[in-house]
Image (cartoon, rainbow, N blue to C red):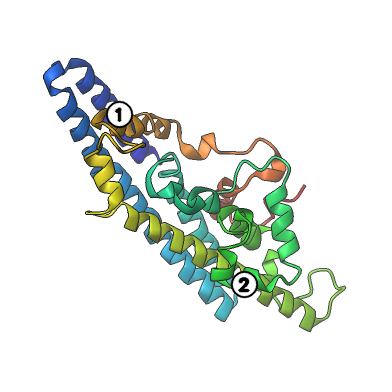
Amino acid sequence: MLAISREVACFALAATMLCASAPVAQTEADHAAIARAALTEVIRPGYAAFGEATSALSGKVDTLCKQPSDVALKEARNAFATTVDAWSKVEIFRFGPINEDHRFDRLFYWPDPKSIGLKQVQDALHRDQAATLPYELSKKSVALQGLPALEYLLYGDRADALAKGHQAVDGTQSLAQIEDEASFRCSFANSVATNVDRIAKNVIEGWCEGSAYEKAFLTPSAGDPAYHAPKKSRSNSTRRLPLASSSSATRSLPRRSAHRLLWRGRSLRHSGEAASPFRI
């Protein structure tokens, strides 16, 4: 995170100095150059890294479901933590294709001060079959579709059953009940991971060369409500870049212990701890 923070902070500073010192005649050209640099040097690489992480995450969760084990669960959690790191570097961008089809909220339903998302995930674990089908899941509440939901499925109460379905957690359930619980939970997690990966890929495609978003961002027109002038594109990008210097992970850390969502998952990778980040 530190590397990307320095990069974007320096980029934003340079952009600000450039605009302040450039002659008036060069202003429009400078705005366009800054927007292009933001797209090609920060936005696209950031989302590309996020897409690579979500692909790996989807694969690891799928493996966990097909071949459950302690190692598979650990690898899925590590992949989740890597995805969180990648997301923290693009979470600051609240414009472009991430705003289409409620993609941002579907990826990251937060803040959630009343624990609505957590309650919905817990309710879905009571055999909401639609939650195990990516296409059906994409039509359900945004709180069920993204990284916060997946963290609970991988780290929350009884998540260890994903790897140890043959071991009774509290001795009150039969072997078949526990294995069935673990299987459903993993199918739900697999569905969420697939959904997250698809959203990431859609955002990457939305910013690709020749896309409508690229054209609107780099060559704005007077009739475009979002980007009607080059300076509008520059403003949208550079005002976001300095935020990364304070670390998105730190800014997004929920205050209440019951809501240590994504960033708790990242810290668990290094500590080896597997306790639920949602336990109150």
Question: Residue reaching furthest right?
Answer: 172
Q: Amino acid at mark 1?
A: Ala
The residue tagged 2 is 132
In this figure, which residue is indicated by the disc labeled 1? 12
The foreground one among 215 and 105 is: 215
Determine the image quadrant of residue 74.
bottom right
Q: Position of residue 265 (x, y in %)?
A: 58, 52
Could you give the CA–CA distance between mark 2 and mark 1, rounded to whole angstroms?
42 Å
Q: Residue at x 45, y 35 (%)?
A: 247
Helix or strand or loop: what does disc 1 sit on? helix
Q: Nearer the viewer, residue 57 or 73?
A: 57
What is the tally of numbered marks visible in this picture?
2
Q: Is residue 159 visible?
A: yes
Q: Residue at x 50, y 40 (%)?
A: 249
Q: Residue type at mark 2: give it.
A: Thr
Residue 125 versus residue 219 in the image, above or below: below
